[in-house]
């Protein structure tokens, strides 16, 4: 009897499931096309990850490479550089998160308050231009400008901030700051685009009603604009948190040198040295896998926390 | 009424002034280094090596641009890039929006699993070699479609779409449902017109990716006819870079007005210019509330 | 409504694009017509029919064939078929080449080609690249000796014996043939062989401080000091008393190679290879550099600048002295010469050892040469490929590639075969145009044999002449010590990598050390680290390679 009822119960649940599916067959179809795409272009090649546990030689098929277990991971954690590169990676990323994340939001909100349409458009266009300067070019300019006879030292000495020139990129203590500031300069306007879009989606009637009620500028920013883009901010925050294991490779690559290495050697650079320059594909893959696992965990954690705090989240 | 000189409007005016001032500073800080690049790109390359060019070219020259545009097949490369940008962006934006719309529905069965499948793709990849083998196997190698199909979907963009779709008022969808419209019709007729700001944002992301991508051209393309502009220009820059190697250095010495630095600047200016021109057209979709208003009206 | 509009714009754009594409497609069709395939085919048939079994292999079949040739360096921009040299070679041999050159990301490109077994017919890359070992061990390239045995015995006549021995692998096969290899049996008495390693000083400054002897530590430091005192700035920016090559992830070439050679530090002690970094002469001069920093004669810029910043500074004459590859700064040198012939850099005798032995810079090239050219197992016609390779490394091929076609690009003038004056003039004034029009000299350097072309070389011109001639007679071969590093993914290779990483960080620290005690402490720590990770394994690996090399070179 009990068995029967259980079976009947599961049967009816299945039936209900099928019914639900058939009701949302269009929605399912739309979602599944995306899933299939991901299966082909993202999941099919993922077998490449197993070389993290093998000793892979690129002239031979992956399947024939011998297993080495967790050896590459042990090598990485045991490398005496491990602590240093982890510290630098996290240091630069967290600074970028703390300063570089809120600034584009503030910028977008302030820009939204500009009444002249023309000026607003102009500022927006100008501010996103640096995104298109490649790091190779920008890095070269930065090295020249911050060198001993460069323009920055010239200005600082004229202003009596410095008594003698400082080669900024030769001093590890400045490196994180340089990396963060130059990145913000380059990406401020570009990162603000998404918030501009979010603000554009706010119903103008809300503002009109607020104005009629006599709300001040600040009131409107804090009562309407910010609450309305909260969801977008939360989602981007979660994504930003999940990416703190990564750094901007191109940027660090052009700005690093042996003198600032104690502050500039980050995971991505290390992987490059190992993978590209030393042909240790398995080792580089293992480090990347470690990075990916941490990132996914960060994403899930940040998502849960944000959901609790703001009620907005990815999932 | 609003023009009366109340205390509030004084503080508002002060805010406005300070705000404009901040924006002007940002403009200067962003524009100057760009101006520096432009000025140097219009200067004789060898002369620019002497440094000290800050406001205006010292030896005006368009040789750098001549070197960039010397080979007429650059036009074909430009065409490839424009084509992939237009088609690739249009497809990617609508495709991603469609999948994201479905994923944004709380009632979608299996939604959690789908989201997990997607999130994993953000961080895990099998590396270039398995991907290359896949591309070869499915016949995309040296095929124009290699620019389009593999970049049609990126879960990061889907997340942004989903966040936007969640915030849309559900009243319109419900009334359409009562009228018997299915989800596809609702997506096309109601959701798309309602979401132009986010569509425009993602279009910018994807469009700029397509415009700036040179990697696919290096790895997945063999024929010169299918080279996108960035791959093509990368090559020009490399050819104008004084070789690091002895044979090169022993033989050919780079001479004349073009240096690797000056040609880099010129390529950068030349490829960024079209984007700057297109941007204002997209900007109008960011104008506050225009669409919600029109739909409601 | 905005949507419809954008759709319209989009469709117009697409239509436009299709127009542009089809238009450019047309023009390119017209472009390819000029290659005149028919004519080439005719000639191929003409020359192909009268068979002569005695003649060189490449003459036996001169029908049309196009090989794909991968060149591992993105800066290689020469094309095939447009200039005099390549037209002439195609006419002669029927071979056309389609160069495949990665646009950046060279290693990724090569890795994908290897992993997916899609290598083209010929593959050229530096002997030190990881790809060489991968291709050879993965059986992706033909053993050249097997191809030669099968199809073209002339290969052994054209190739240098010691070069083949040098590249013979334990399995007895030779997989790639190098360019710029200095085979000892081909070096003749009195041959003037260049070196790239130079110690350079700015001529005007050097003369004004009284042309001091800079071979001793005192002379060296005093000269830097005098230069800085007399010329504190150049164009308002501080003078940099000493310049070196770029400090990279793996160290600094100026110190590890140039300086070591200038000091004539022997590579072996009691018949055994050892670690030159421990040699007292090397440490003595590293301390001199440290002293220079103490005397404020070292600018921190030299640790920060990448090559392009250095080139800017050279063009400005910002350095007083440099330990630098002269060939890497030739274009800046010409620029300086054009502006002011007194501002150029001249090569002088640099830091020397205690007994003031002459500087011993290395031959440009060395035994291993520069790049290796392989024939892949995917090759569509390995018979023609080996024959073409033989042609290219033969005397005739060398001449065709270096000088071109007689009467067009070269002639016998004053009893010497040399390029026509007009051709040389264009080469020296507009290299790009020269490559497009003639393509002689080293435009196609893939198999250039420096020793073979020496006799056709045009004389040097100032300011390059002085720099190049300084090395004549001083430069020597370090042949046995080329290519002795273990492969990167072997155990020894991983140890070496760790040492190099450490060394890259150590060198600036040594120069910037506050005192000799600190210097010694750093050196001791470094040596201890080497012991701890068993660096002697790397040394014994190298010893083994050196022994093999000596055998190949016929040195006891």
Image: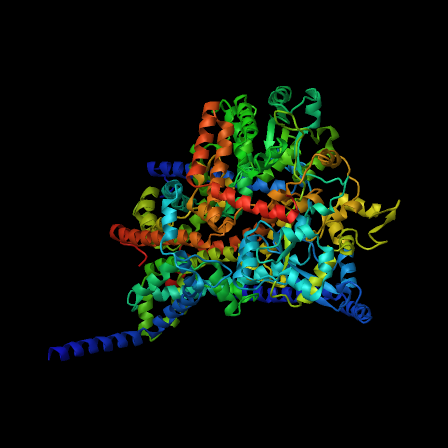
Which corner quadrant holds the N terminus of chain B?
A: top left
Q: Is residue A292 above or below residue A16?
A: above
> Looking at this view, is C415 or C490 the one in front?
C490
Q: Quadrant of the C terminus of chain B?
A: bottom left
Q: Is residue C296 above or below residue C476?
A: above
**Can you say whether C492 is above or below C260 in the image?**
below
Looking at the image, which is closer to me, A43 or C183?
A: C183
Q: Position of residue B279 (x, y in %)?
A: 52, 53
How far across and how far down the image is residue A43, in percent?
A: 40, 64
Q: Is residue C214 left or right of residue C56?
A: left
Is residue C180 or residue C69 the one in the foreground? C180
**Residue B90 in view (yes/no):** yes
Horizontal side, residue C87 vs residue A175: left or right: right
> Would you say residue A116 is visible in this rendering?
no
Q: Residue B291: which quarter of the image?
A: bottom left
Residue C301 x/y as whole percent: 55, 32
Left or right of C128 on screen, residue C526: left
In the image, is residue C75 above or below residue C17? above
């Amino acid at each position: 009897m009990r068995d029967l009822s259980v079976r009947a119960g599961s049967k009816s649940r299945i039936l209900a499931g099928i019914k639900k599916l058939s009701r949302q067959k269009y929605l399912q179809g739309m979602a599944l096309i995306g899933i299939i795409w991901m299966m082909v272009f993202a999941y099919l090649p993922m077998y490449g990850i197993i070389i993290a546990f093998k000793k892979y030689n690129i002239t031979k098929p992956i399947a024939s490479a011998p297993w080495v277990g967790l050896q590459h991971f042990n090598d990485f954690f045991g490398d005496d550089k491990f602590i240093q590169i982890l510290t630098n990676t996290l240091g630069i990323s967290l600074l970028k998160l703390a300063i570089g994340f809120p600034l584009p939001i503030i910028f977008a909100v302030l820009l939204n308050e500009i009444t002249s349409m023309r000026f607003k458009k102009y500022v927006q266009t100008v501010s996103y231009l640096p995104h298109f300067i490649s790091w190779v070019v920008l890095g070269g300019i930065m090295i020249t400008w911050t060198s001993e006879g460069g323009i920055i030292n010239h200005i600082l000495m004229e202003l009596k901030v410095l008594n003698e020139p400082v080669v900024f990129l030769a001093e590890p203590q400045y490196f994180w700051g340089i990396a963060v500031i130059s990145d913000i300069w380059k990406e401020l306007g570009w990162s603000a685009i998404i918030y501009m879009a979010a603000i554009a989606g706010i119903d103008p009637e809300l503002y009109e009603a607020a104005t009629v009620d006599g709300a001040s500028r600040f009131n409107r920013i804090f009562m309407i604009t910010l609450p309305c883009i909260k969801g977008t901010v939360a989602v981007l925050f979660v994504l930003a948190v999940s990416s703190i294991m990564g750094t901007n490779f191109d940027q660090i690559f052009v700005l690093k040198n042996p003198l600032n290495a104690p502050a500039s050697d980050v995971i991505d650079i290390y992987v490059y040295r190992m993978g590209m320059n030393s042909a240790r594909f398995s080792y580089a893959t293992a480090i990347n896998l470690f990075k990916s696992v941490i990132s996914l965990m960060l994403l899930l954690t940040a998502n849960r926390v944000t959901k609790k705090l703001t009620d907005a989240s990815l999932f | 009424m609003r023009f009366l000189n109340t205390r509030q409007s004084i503080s508002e005016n002060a805010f406005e002034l300070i705000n404009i001032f901040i924006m002007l500073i940002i403009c200067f800080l962003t524009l100057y280094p760009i101006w520096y690049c432009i000025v140097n790109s219009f200067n004789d390359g060898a002369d620019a090596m002497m440094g000290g060019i800050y406001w205006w070219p010292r030896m005006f020259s368009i040789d750098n641009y001549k070197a960039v545009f010397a080979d007429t097949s650059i036009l074909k490369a430009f065409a490839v890039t424009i084509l992939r940008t237009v088609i690739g962006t249009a497809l990617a934006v609508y495709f991603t929006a469609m999948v994201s719309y479905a994923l944004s529905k709380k009632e979608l069965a299996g939604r959690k699993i789908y989201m997990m499948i997607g999130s994993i793709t953000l961080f895990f990849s099998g590396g270039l070699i398995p991907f290359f083998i896949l591309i070869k196997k499915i016949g995309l190698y040296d095929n124009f479609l290699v620019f389009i199909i593999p970049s049609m979907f990126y879960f990061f963009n889907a997340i942004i779409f989903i966040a936007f779709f969640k915030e849309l008022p559900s009243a319109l969808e419900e009334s359409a449902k009562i009228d018997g419209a299915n989800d596809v019709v609702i997506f096309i007729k109601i959701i798309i017109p309602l979401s132009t700001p986010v569509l425009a944002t993602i279009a910018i992301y994807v469009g700029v990716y397509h415009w700036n991508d040179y990697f696919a051209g290096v790895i997945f393309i063999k024929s010169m006819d299918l080279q996108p502009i960035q791959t093509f220009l990368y090559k020009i820059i490399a050819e104008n870079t004084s070789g690091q190697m002895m044979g090169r250095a022993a033989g050919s010495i780079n001479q004349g007005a073009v240096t690797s630095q000056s040609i880099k600047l010129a390529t950068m200016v030349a490829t960024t210019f079209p984007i700057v021109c297109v941007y204002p057209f997209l900007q109008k979709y960011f104008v506050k509330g225009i669409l919600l208003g029109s739909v409601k009206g | 409504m905005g949507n419809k509009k954008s759709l319209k714009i989009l469709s117009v754009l697409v239509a436009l694009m299709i127009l542009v594409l089809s238009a450019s497609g047309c023009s390119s069709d017209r472009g390819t017509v000029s290659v005149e395939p028919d004519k080439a085919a005719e000639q191929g048939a003409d020359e192909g029919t009268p068979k002569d079994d005695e003649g060189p292999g490449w003459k036996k079949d001169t029908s049309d064939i196009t090989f794909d040739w991968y060149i591992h360096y993105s800066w290689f921009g020469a094309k095939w078929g447009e200039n005099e040299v390549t037209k002439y070679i195609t006419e002669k041999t029927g071979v056309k080449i389609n160069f495949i050159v990665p646009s950046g990301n060279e290693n990724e490109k090569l890795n994908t080609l290897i992993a997916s077994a899609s290598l083209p017919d010929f593959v050229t890359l530096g002997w030190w690249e990881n790809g060489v070992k991968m291709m050879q061990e993965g059986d992706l390239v033909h053993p050249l000796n097997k191809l030669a045995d099968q199809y073209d015995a002339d290969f052994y006549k054209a190739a240098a014996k010691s070069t083949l021995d040098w590249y013979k692998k334990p399995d007895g096969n030779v997989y790639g043939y190098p360019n710029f290899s200095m085979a000892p049996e081909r070096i003749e008495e009195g041959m003037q062989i260049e070196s790239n390693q130079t110690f350079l000083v700015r001529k005007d400054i050097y003369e004004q401080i009284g042309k001091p002897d800079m071979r001793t530590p005192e002379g060296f430091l005093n000269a830097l000091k005098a230069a800085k005192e007399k010329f504190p700035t150049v164009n308002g920016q501080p003078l940099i008393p000493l310049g070196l090559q770029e400090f990279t992830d793996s160290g600094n070439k100026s110190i590890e190679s140039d300086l070591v050679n200038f000091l004539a530090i022997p590579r072996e002690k009691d018949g055994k290879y050892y670690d030159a970094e421990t040699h007292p002469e090397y440490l003595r001069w590293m301390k001199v550099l440290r002293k220079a920093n103490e005397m404020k004669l070292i600018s921190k810029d030299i640790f920060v600048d990448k090559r392009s910043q250095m080139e800017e500074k050279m063009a400005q004459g910002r350095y007083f002295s440099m330990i630098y590859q002269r060939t890497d700064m030739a274009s800046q040198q010409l620029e300086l010469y054009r502006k002011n012939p007194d501002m150029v850099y001249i090569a002088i005798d640099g830091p020397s050892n205690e007994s003031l032995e002459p500087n011993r810079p290395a031959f440009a090239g060395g035994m291993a040469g520069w790049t290796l050219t392989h024939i892949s197992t995917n090759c569509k016609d390995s018979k023609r490929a080996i024959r073409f390779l033989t042609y290219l490394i033969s005397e005739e091929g060398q001449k065709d590639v270096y000088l071109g076609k007689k009467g067009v690009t070269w002639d016998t003038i004053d009893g010497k075969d040399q390029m026509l004056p007009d051709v040389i003039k264009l080469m020296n004034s507009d290299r790009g145009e020269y490559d497009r029009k003639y393509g002689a000299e080293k435009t196609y350097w893939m198999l250039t044999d420096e020793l073979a072309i020496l006799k056709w070389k045009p004389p040097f011109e100032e300011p390059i002449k002085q720099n190049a001639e300084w090395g004549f007679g001083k430069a020597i071969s370090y042949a046995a010590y080329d290519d002795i590093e273990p492969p990167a993914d072997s155990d020894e290779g991983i140890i070496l990598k760790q040492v190099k990483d450490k060394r890259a960080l150590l060198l600036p620290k040594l120069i910037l050390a506050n005192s000799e005690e600190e210097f010694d402490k750093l050196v001791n720590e470094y040596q201890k680290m080497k012991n701890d990770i068993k660096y002697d394994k790397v040394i014994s690996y190298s010893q083994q390679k050196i022994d093999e090399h000596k055998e190949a070179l016929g040195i006891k």
